[in-house]
Image (cartoon, rainbow, N blue to C red):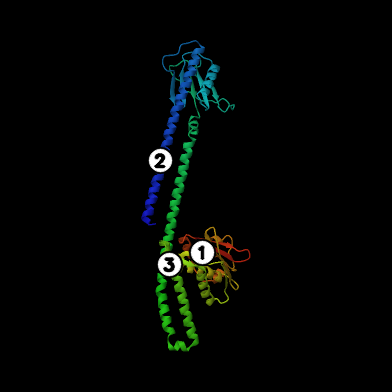
Amino acid sequence: MKTKNLNTIIVLGLIATVGILIAQLLWTREAFTVEEQKFSQKTHVALLEVVKKLYKSSNSELPVNNPIQKVANDYYIVNVENDFQPDILEYYLKSEFAKFNINTDYEYAMYNCESDEMVYGNYISVSNKKSDKKDVYFPKHENLVYYFAVRFPNETSYLLSSLRFWLFLSFALIVVMLIYVYSIYTIIQQKKYSELQRDFINNMTHEFKTPLSSILLASSYLNKQESIQKDEKLEKYTEIIINQSKKLNSHIEQILNIAKSDNEPMKMKITAINVVPVIKDVIDNLQLKKPELKVTIFAQKEFIVQADEFHFTNIIYNLLDNSIKYCEENPEINITITENNNQIQLDFSDNGIGVSNKNINFIFDKFYRIPSTKSNEVNGFGLGLYYVKKICTQHKWKIFATNNNNKGITVSIVIPK
């Protein structure tokens, strides 16, 4: 994906997430305001019913003006203009608050004419837990004689508890946003490291190819000289230089191809391929270098797959070559080809040194080499199996590795028909 497109997606995603979060917080705030208004209305009606019952018990007429004043969000003053008993008031408060489903703690106090101050009445807990009397200050209201005050100390937490869903949703959105920001940061860092790695590989390989071409050219010219051909040792040394230079050049080409394929998919020419003959051709080529190599193919019939012949041949070669490299005795490889559930499966089982269970999942990673004495002896960059995995992925095949019971590993390729 181009950097410009990636940046656009990141910015749009961030704007969308922030917008949703802001909208959610605004909705939560609006919902809290609505709940606060509903609570205030219920409290107002409930206190009005308390006043009616107080007047009814004293056979007095109701006042014309509204006797209830909301001094603060959690503090109400009720003017009754008549004397009343604290026990009766508490009973009416409990019954009316329960009737209107006001399920939060509250406290009330009454004005005492004799002492000219508010006298603490009681603290009512909806949890029915006994609580000690608290010294809570109720401010005195001027110009009123017979009145009482009610305070809801836990009103905010009570209202928030009724908005649990909204609060949970807001919290979830904040978590999602944090995860999104962290993911974007990780993607950017990985992209940055990937670009640095790719640039380094490209620069390194191109810098190597120029002097290597000169070495190959000079050594090939040197090998044709009469004086070199007459001297057996010198001819052997020049051949070593040429062979090793060609080997190094092959490694560099492989690195360049892998680096190039990371930017764009490799071009494929898909054709119908007879699997067994291709495998036999690769085995014949490998046995020229390793005559003691023993490969057995188990296939009950001919198997045809749709694949790029060049890359498919390279897959077979890389898997067999790996089995040869990482074997401390005469390599023996069994290739089993089976068909089930409309799939063809190729299993490459060897008698090599094997891979520990903790490392086997990493063998297809780029530049990964298993830390062992044998790995230090074998030349390579850890790109062979990465290339195999990449080609299988591009063909939409599955590839995985498992340890054998005795020794070695089995690499399996699953090809849909």
Instruction: Choose between 2 and 285: the one closer to the eye.
Output: 285
Name the foreground residue: 102 vs 251: 251
Decide which of tag 1 and tag 3 comes sooner along the chain: 3
Q: Residue furthest front?
A: 301
| Mark whose residue sits in front, 2 or 3 | 3
* Kind of residue at disc 3: Asn
Task: Label 2: state its secondary structure.
Answer: helix
The residue that mark 2 highlights is: 22
Question: How far separated are the C-alphas under marks 1 and 2?
Answer: 45 Å
Q: x and y percent of residue 289 in the render?
A: 53, 76
The circle on residue 257 is: 3
Vertically, is 96 above or below 210?
A: above
Please tell me which residue is depicted at 48% across the width and 17% down the height of the picture. Answer: 51
Residue 132 coordinates in the image, percent (x, y): 58, 26
Of labels 1 and 2, earlier in sequence is 2
Is 213 in front, or is 276?
276
How would you rate the neighbour count of disc 1 (Cα within 10 Å): few for under 14, some for 14-19, many for 20 or more?
some
In the picture, the disc for residue 1 is none
| Gap between marks 2 and 3 measured at Cα | 48 Å
Identity, as a three-letter code, of the amino acid under mark 1: Tyr
Q: CA distance from mark 1 to mark 3?
A: 17 Å
Badge 1 marks a residue whose secondary structure is loop
Say if residue 139 shows up in the picture. no
Report the residue marked by disc 1: 368
Q: Earlier in the sequence, mark 2 or mark 3?
A: 2
Query: Which residue is pictured at 41% across the width and 83% down the height?
Result: 221
Confirm or deny contact between disc 2 and disc 3 (CB under 8 A): no
In contact (CB < 8 Å): disc 1 and disc 3:
no
Three-letter code for the amino acid on which mark 2 is drawn: Ile
Residue at image location 42% in from the left, 81% down from the top: 220
